[in-house]
Amino acid sequence: MATHARELGVTLTDGRRFQADLIGDDPDTDLAVIRISAPNLVPAHLGESHSIRVGQLAIAIGNPFGFQCSVTAGVVSALGRSLRAQSGRLIHDVIQTDAALNPGNSGGPLVNSKGEVIGVNTAIILPAQGICFAIAINTAKVVVSQLFKHGKVKRGSVGVVGQNVTLPRRVVRFHDLSSENGVLVVAVEPGSPAQKSGVQDGDVIISYDSHSTAGIDDLHKLLSEERIGKHTELRVLRRNRIVTMPIIAEELAAK
């Protein structure tokens, strides 16, 4: 990520070079925003993720292995994929394409036949061929907006360490739960929203804000910026009985 660089520079297609400043970055989506001061810049046209269809043309642009402005073409192979970032969180609504990507393509645009940017290239799966991923442009728009506003992406936290568990079927049937899985609370951080609400080690979180939490990824997805400071309810399974408690998520501290 850009935060580990001692200095940043940008080389434009016409050969001009400029020093860049970091506005902010988000390891959870593998995106960053940098700024340069340069005249006569032409912005890329951004498309809409919801207009993308499986099978349509996808063109990836980047600098694989240092080969400047390389272009590869393929199709959109799938939509709505989830990809785990290096930070451990899932990136949702990822575009899968078979347009060839290599080291150096990351951060480059994925465009459609109209030249509109529909994604930001991010990852490949080795040693597989033709399985490449891009962050959907609508996701990128939201992340970039927050990076401009805050320099980071705000996410919520309730202050628990958890792990995914499968619930006994008899418990699921008895309580008529919508999922057979939940989040086992392994530890509760001192002074956290969870501790203030009475969450205990050994509780199994089964819903947050009326949404089922079948795993840690579900809980992460629900702990978005709009839920920070919001009064909501947490439902846990405690020794085979359901306990509902009020909770207010706090902003996740930067690592």
Image (tube, helix red, strand yellow):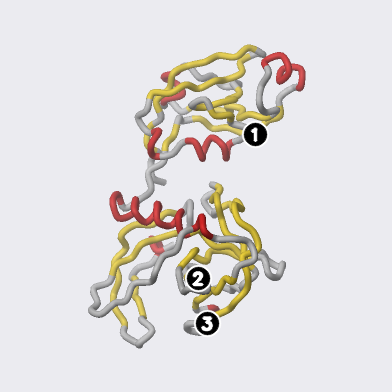
Which residue bears the numbered disc 2?
A: 111
**Is residue 220 placed above or below 137 in the rendered structure?**
above
Residue 154 placement: quadrant: top left
Apparent side of residue 186 relative to residue 155 in the rendered image (left or right): right
Query: Which residue was labeled with disc 3?
Result: 70
Give the residue drawn at x 57%, y 64%. 123
Query: In the rendering, at what x and y percent does residue 135 appear?
Result: 51, 59
Viewer-closest of 40 and 168: 40
State which tag comes first along the sequence, 3 or 1: 3
Q: Position of residue 194 (x, y in %)?
A: 46, 24
**Three-letter amino acid code at disc 3?**
Ser
Real-space CA distance between mark 3 and mark 2, rounded to the nearest whole angstrom: 13 Å
Q: Which mark is residue 164?
A: 1
Q: Residue at x 54, y 62 (%)?
A: 134
Q: Nearer the viewer, mark 3 or mark 2?
A: 2
Residue 104, visible in the rendered structure: no
Q: Earlier in the sequence, mark 2 or mark 1?
A: 2
| 154 over 228 or under it: above or below | below
Residue 37: x %, y % from top left: 23, 73
Decide: marks 3, 1 in contact (CB < 8 A)?
Answer: no
Q: CA distance from mark 2 to mark 1?
A: 37 Å
Viewer-nearest residue: 55 or 188: 55
Ranked by sequence position, the earlier of labels 3 and 2 is: 3
- Circle 2: is it few (<14), some (14-19), or many (20+) Cα within 10 Å? many
